Image: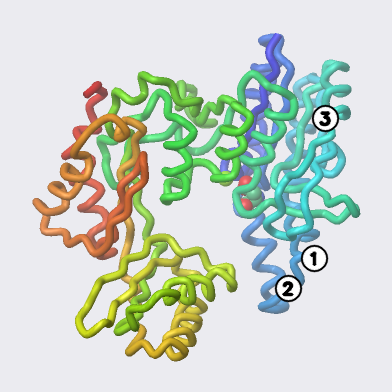
C-alpha cells in the first residue's frame, strides 16, 4: 500500500462536471489499495473574483481580512469534492488547512508553512477515509487564518507529502507535463520524462508557470518525488526528482522566458567604493528583488549601472533609484519596460563547454541583440527586446535540437 498525495488546480475543479471527473481520478487511486490525501485549489477563477470583490471597496484592503476572504475559495472546492466522492459510495472527508494543523508564520498573503501536525490526517487515513485538504491556507500560532501566496496549493500538497512521507505527490494540472519550451511558442516542444529539482526551480522562477517555486524548494529539501500530470488526458507526465548523474548527459533541458521584467539604468555614477552597496541596499530595504546587474566602466571616472526588476516593482524601484542617484551625484536615471529574459537551463552545463556560445549564436543568426547576460552553474539568461521573445525561444530551441530526445 502506498500513500499518495494528489493535487488538483483551479481549472481541474472549475465546475461540478470537472469535480465529478476529479472524484473518479481520486477513487481510482483509492481502488488500487492506496491511502489518498487530496489537495484542491479554489474552483476556476474564484480567487481572482474574491480579490476583485475586495478591490471594489478599497485599493488597500487589510491583508488579514484578504486572507479571511480568499481562503473561502478552497473551502468551497473541498466540500464539493467530498460530496462528489461520497456520492460515488466512497468514504471521504474534507478539512480546511487549520483543521489539519497546517501552521504558518504571520505573514498574511505570503505565509510560510512552519509546521504540520499530521496526527489528524493519519487518524482519518487509518479509518480508511479519503482525506481532502484545502490548499493555499494555514493558521498562525495565534489561530489567525493565512494564505501562502498565489498558486500556493502546490506548496500545501508537497508540504503534506513531506510531512506524511508520501510515496509520490501527483500534481494534476491543465498541461500534461513539463516541456522543453512553452508549446504555445514552440509547437514541437517535447515533454520531459523527468527533470531535477534544481532545473525545475530555475524554470519556475524563470517564468515557466507549471509549479509554484516554493513547492519545488520544499520537494527538494524533503526529497518528495513530484509527478506533474494532466487531469484531462490520462498519459504519464513529468517526474520532478533528485538529480542523478545521468542527467548531466543532457546539456540543456529547456528554454524559459519571462516577459515580466524591466530595466533601470543609473548613468554617470561616480566610480568609488560603496556606491553599489548604497544603490542595492536602498532597493533591498524596500523589499525590491533585483535580478540581473551590469556595471559598465565609462569615461572620466564615471560608470553606468543597469539592473532588472519585475514590472510590478518598476515604479517603486525607479523612485528609489532617483533618490539614490541624487544623493551620490549620478547624472541620470532611465528605465525600459520593453525587455524580456530568455534562459536555457540544464544540469548538463556543469560538464559541457560552449553552451553560452550556442545560445548566443542562435540569437545572433536571428539578429536579436543581447542587452544583458547572467549565468549560474545550470543556467544562462539573456535580456533582449520584449518583441523578440517568441523568435528567440524558437531559435534557441532549434539550435540545441531540443525537439529530438537525445543524449549529447
Ligand atoms: N486559489 C489560489 C490561487 O488562485 C491558490 C492556488 O490556486 O494554488 O492562487
Ligand atoms: Mg496553480
Pointer 2 local density, CA inside 10 Å: few below 14, some 14–19, many at least 20: few
**Residue at screen point 53% across, 26% down:** 227
Disc 3 is placed on an element classified as loop
Vertical comparison of 397 with 126: above or below: below
Lateral position of residue 170 relative to residue 186, left or right: right
Front residue (pair 116, 22): 116
Front residue (pair 230, 145): 145
Q: Mark on residue 65? A: 1
Q: Position of residue 62 (x, y in %)?
A: 76, 71
Q: Mark on residue 326? A: none
Q: Position of residue 308 (x, y in %)?
A: 39, 66
Q: Which of labels 3 and 2 is toward the front?
A: 3
**Residue at screen point 34% across, 40% down:** 345
Quadrant location, the N terminus: top right
Choose the circle earlier in sequence order: 3 or 1.
1
Vertical comparison of 385 with 104: above or below: below
Q: Which residue is mark 3?
A: 118
> Would the CB of label 3 be found within 8 Å of ligand 1?
no
Lateral position of residue 305 relative to residue 15, left or right: left
Q: Which residue is mark 2?
A: 61
Amino acid at each position: 500500500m502506498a500513500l499518495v498525495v494528489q493535487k488538483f488546480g483551479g481549472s481541474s475543479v472549475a465546475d461540478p462536471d470537472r469535480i465529478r471527473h476529479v472524484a473518479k481520478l481520486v477513487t481510482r487511486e483509492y481502488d488500487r489499495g492506496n491511502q489518498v490525501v487530496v489537495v484542491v485549489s479554489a474552483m476556476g477563477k474564484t480567487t481572482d473574483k474574491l480579490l476583485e470583490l475586495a478591490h471594489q471597496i478599497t485599493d488597500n484592503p487589510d491583508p488579514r481580512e484578504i486572507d479571511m476572504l480568499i481562503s473561502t475559495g478552497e473551502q468551497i472546492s473541498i466540500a464539493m469534492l467530498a460530496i462528489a466522492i461520497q456520492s460515488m459510495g466512497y468514504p471521504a472527508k474534507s478539512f480546511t488547512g487549520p483543521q489539519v494543523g497546517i501552521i504558518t508564520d504571520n505573514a498574511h498573503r505570503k505565509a510560510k508553512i512552519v509546521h504540520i501536525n499530521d496526527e489528524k490526517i493519519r487518524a482519518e487515513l487509518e479509518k480508511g477515509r479519503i482525506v481532502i485538504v484545502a490548499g493555499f491556507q494555514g493558521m498562525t500560532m495565534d489561530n489567525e487564518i493565512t494564505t501562502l501566496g498565489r498558486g500556493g496549493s502546490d506548496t500545501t500538497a508537497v508540504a503534506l507529502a513531506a510531512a506524511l512521507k508520501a510515496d509520490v505527490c501527483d500534481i494534476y494540472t491543465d498541461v500534461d507535463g513539463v516541456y522543453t519550451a512553452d508549446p504555445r511558442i514552440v509547437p514541437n516542444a517535447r515533454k520531459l520524462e523527468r527533470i531535477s529539482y534544481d532545473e525545475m526551480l530555475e524554470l519556475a522562477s524563470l517564468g515557466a508557470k507549471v509549479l509554484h517555486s516554493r513547492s519545488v524548494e520544499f520537494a527538494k529539501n524533503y526529497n518528495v518525488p513530484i509527478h506533474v500530470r494532466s487531469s484531462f488526458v490520462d498519459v504519464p507526465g513529468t517526474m520532478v526528482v533528485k538529480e542523478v548523474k545521468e542527467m548531466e548527459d543532457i546539456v540543456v533541458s529547456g528554454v524559459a522566458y519571462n516577459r515580466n521584467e524591466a530595466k533601470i539604468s543609473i548613468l554617470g555614477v561616480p566610480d568609488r567604493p560603496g556606491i553599489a552597496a548604497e544603490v542595492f541596499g536602498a532597493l533591498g530595504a524596500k523589499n525590491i528583488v533585483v535580478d540581473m546587474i551590469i556595471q559598465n566602466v565609462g569615461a572620466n571616472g564615471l560608470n553606468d549601472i543597469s539592473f532588472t526588476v519585475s514590472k510590478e516593482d518598476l515604479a517603486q524601484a525607479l523612485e528609489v533609484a532617483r533618490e539614490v542617484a541624487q544623493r551620490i551625484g549620478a547624472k541620470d536615471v532611465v528605465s525600459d519596460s520593453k525587455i524580456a529574459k530568455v534562459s536555457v537551463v540544464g544540469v548538463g552545463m556543469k560538464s559541457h563547454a560552449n553552451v553560452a556560445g550556442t545560445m548566443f549564436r542562435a540569437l545572433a543568426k536571428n539578429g536579436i541583440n543581447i542587452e544583458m547576460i547572467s549565468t549560474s552553474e545550470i543556467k544562462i539568461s539573456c535580456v533582449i527586446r520584449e518583441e523578440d521573445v517568441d523568435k528567440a525561444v524558437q531559435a534557441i530551441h532549434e539550435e540545441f535540437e531540443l525537439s529530438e530526445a537525445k543524449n549529447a
